[in-house]
Image (cartoon, rainbow, N blue to C red):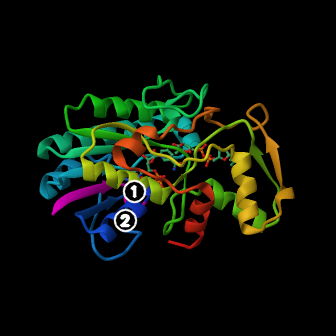
Amino acid sequence: MQKVLITGANGLLGQNLTRLLVEDGKYEVIATGRGTDRLCEDGYTYYELDITDNEAVSHLIGEIKPDFVVHTAAMTQVDDCEREPEKANLINIAGTFHIIDACRLVDAFLLYISTDFVFNGETGLLTEEENVSPVNYYGQTKLAAEKLVQESKLKWAIARTVLVYGQVKDMSRSNIILWVKKNLEAGKPIKVVDDQWRTPTLALDLAKGCELILDKKAEGIFHISGKDYLRPYDIAIRTAEYFGLDKSLISPTNASQFVEVGKRPLKTGFNIRKAQTQLGYEPHSFEEGIRIMQEGF
Ligand SMILES: NC(=O)C1=CN([C@@H]2O[C@H](COP(=O)(O)OP(=O)(O)OC[C@H]3O[C@@H](n4cnc5c(N)ncnc54)[C@H](OP(=O)(O)O)[C@@H]3O)[C@@H](O)[C@H]2O)C=CC1
Ligand SMILES: Cc1cn([C@H]2C[C@H](O)[C@@H](COP(=O)(O)OP(=O)(O)O[C@H]3O[C@@H](C)C(=O)[C@@H](O)[C@H]3O)O2)c(=O)[nH]c1=O
């Protein structure tokens, strides 16, 4: 069986991907993450791996000799990246460089997970050909890492994704659905932006997109997201409706009033035609996504 090594396996995508690949049984799965295993299931091997430790990365990848590496690990809190650019550089850029170097040692195929935040948000429903121009530091680090991957001379793919939602064990960061649900359940009013546009992505769909890339050894950039083009305000309303929560607690705001440390691009969201035609990728609708998430992990 071919071996797939996953970085960031404790994360939202990492846990979904680890479980999906184990369930589908086509690959031997090696999950790696910061600290101890948080998924704690059977069927894969777990190793602690901090991607900022170059020696540890080359040692482990050199020992395991994976056929594929799926590099999901990243500093994903956008405002923290703005506040701590050196840490963001270390994890998102240097970390990716370490992974690339180690992949070279064993000639592994590298699948790098990137973001809609490489775009400036002037136009939405973006194709893979659109010009990149990030508006925040997180986006800059992810773009710098994309360039390293593209120049690596490895066999590579980049899966860019958008506003991922889902639920895993002991989550590193929340996501919009859980945030809305938690506040409305507590009877707390929330202000949600109505001038951003996104194609929110169920973590399980993203994991499936990654698996399809591995199965086909598909090279190049792929936009892997949900298919519903929504504003965070719409997402909040639909979440309230789905869970029967009080919608009147949600009020609209916009970029001029809701100022964040890291600027967010206004219109992103993806055109996923390439992934649909070349990979056979077919995401769930947003409502199906909430239902799947609600069924638990
Ligand atoms: N979530 C989203 O909305 C989007 C995510 N992406 C990209 O998708 C990928 C997966 O993100 P997602 O799963 O959602 O995010 P998570 O934050 O849930 O997962 C990221 C994982 O990376 C781990 N990590 C951070 N630093 C290191 C390190 N030095 N060494 C090893 N692991 C580390 C984190 O560890 P720990 O658990 O210890 O914090 C965490 O488990 C990322 O590359 C992200 O940039 C792209 C677009 C949207
Ligand atoms: C906290 C908060 C968020 N929001 C909105 C803004 C935003 O669109 C959405 C989610 O907010 P967050 O800060 O969690 O997400 P944000 O950092 O904007 O999300 C990003 O994460 C990184 C990792 C990515 O790569 C991107 O694709 C993107 O999804 O909720 C509000 O409208 N009001 C609020 O009070």
Residue 32 in the image: x percent, y percent? 31, 59
- Write the residue at 64% across / 58% down: 177
Pick out the residue farthest to the right.
248
Cα gap from disc 1 to disc 2, whole angstroms: 8 Å
- Write the residue at 75% across / 40% down: 194
Q: Residues within 10 Å of mark 2 (few under 14, many from 20)?
A: some
* Residue 208: image tag: 1
Q: Is residue 9 magenta?
A: yes
Q: Amino acid at mark 1?
A: Lys
Whether pointer 1 and pointer 2 mark residues with C-beta atoms closer than 8 Å, the reply is yes
Q: Is residue 12 visible?
A: no
In the image, which residues are magenta?
Answer: 1-10
Residue 17 in the image: x percent, y percent? 38, 60
Residues 30 and 221: in front is: 221
* Residue 272: image tag: none
Under circle 2, the secondary element is: helix
Dominant secondary structure of the magenta stretch? strand
287 on left or right of 127: right
Q: Which residue is mark 2?
A: 20
40 over 201 or under it: above or below? below
Q: Residues within 10 Å of mark 1 (few under 14, many from 20)?
A: many
Q: Amino acid at mark 2?
A: Leu
